[in-house]
Image: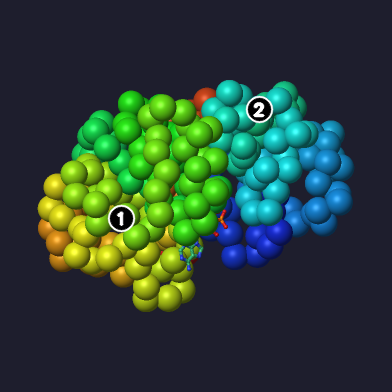
Amino acid sequence: MQVFGLLGNPVEHSLSPPMHEAAYDALGMDARYVTFEPAPEDLAAAVEGARALGVAGLNVTIPFKRDVLELVDPDPLAERIGAVNAIDLPEMRGYNTDAVGAVRALREHGVDCSGTAVVVGAGGAGRAVAFGLADEGMAVRVANRTAERAEELSADVGKAATAHPLDALPDLLADADVLVNCTSVGMEEDRSPVPAGALHPDLAVLDAVYTPPETRLLRDAADAGADTVDGAWMLLYQGVAAFERWTGREAPVGAMNDALRSGL
Ligand code: NAP
């Protein structure tokens, strides 16, 4: 039996186990996906222990995505983002599938990832999405509440990115093609980080927030005639990327999506 897992704290309510196990069931694989909740000081021992026990792949979530970078051999994108959310074992190679998850979520909804993107938020998700979209060739405008974090992210991304305050959003969005919310605003609360009047029909809007899947931002975007993509698609495609990498098989995306949606 193959074993895959998730390292985080807390991981009790993670949707990764049902999503990955639905894929194993759909393909008749003898595999399990389990969660591990090490104390922060035991992170290195946990990763090494998983390797020693023959775990074939690990996802990594809050609060370990940055710290685990030091424990593995990160690929160039994970290194630039500054976070690892998946590890190949026993090789100890680390990578970041949040970036590819966001890009694929947009592409699978027919969004052309060219032109200009506005990324709201400069935390873990914001960094992954900004690098992912810049690597697709998009000009990226990063808007964040804390100016220094937006500036740091745009400097790290390089000449494709610029940094802005949140109150610049109406101007930033006027000629933009894609908007991605990477703040936690809208999670468990009916609030949007973007003024509804700044949204328009030429925009595609991805909200990284997936609890709830239908956020205030996505409702406002639909009302404005914009295309919308909910955060569960990003979560799905980061899982699909890890599954395909670890198993070398094409992921049963429909089964994984059904499991994820019923978990939500
Ligand atoms: P994080 O590293 O803690 O960053 C939080 C971001 O939200 C920061 O940019 C922060 O701004 C901003 N923020 C928080 N409260 C705010 C407020 N009241 N007004 C304006 N900005 C505010 O968190 P994260 O890991 O990036 O996660 C952000 C969201 O993305 C969460 O909802 C998470 O669940 C979601 N996410 C989804 C996926 C997916 O696959 N769909 C993957 C990763 C994350 P400051 O810098 O000013 O504090």
Mark 2–mark 1 distance (CA, rounded to whole Å): 34 Å
Q: Residue at x 59, y 65 (%)?
A: 13
Q: Residue at x 75, y 57 (%)?
A: 37
Residue 191: % across, % down: 37, 73
Q: How many numbered markers are drawn?
A: 2
Q: Residues within 10 Å of mark 1 (few under 14, many from 20)?
A: many
For this view, does 251 lie left or right of residue 194? right
Looking at the image, is 237 positioned above or below residue 230? above
Which residue is labeled 1 in the image? 169
Residue 206: % across, % down: 32, 51
Name the residue nearer the viewer: 189 or 255.
189
Q: Residue at x 66, y 27 (%)?
A: 74
Look at the numbered disc 2 and give the secondary structure of its residue. strand
Name the residue nearer the viewer: 22 or 153.
153
| Foreground tag (2 vs 1) | 1
Where is the C terminus found, in terms of image quarters? bottom left
Residue type, numbered disc 1 = Leu
Residue 251 appears in the rendering:
no
Mark 2 or mark 1: whose residue is earlier in sequence = 2
Look at the numbered disc 1 and give the secondary structure of its residue. helix
Residue 83: % across, % down: 62, 39
Looking at the image, is 239 positioned above or below residue 259? above
Residue type, numbered disc 2 = Pro
Where is the N terminus found, in terms of image quarters? top right
Q: Are marks 2 and 1 in contact (CB under 8 Å)?
A: no
Q: Residue at x 43, y 60 (%)?
A: 210
For this view, does 163 lie left or right of residue 10? left
Residue 47: % across, % down: 79, 40
Which residue is labeled 2 in the image? 74
Q: Residues within 10 Å of mark 2 (few under 14, many from 20)?
A: many
Residue 150 appears in the rendering:
yes
For this view, does 123 lie left or right of residue 88? left
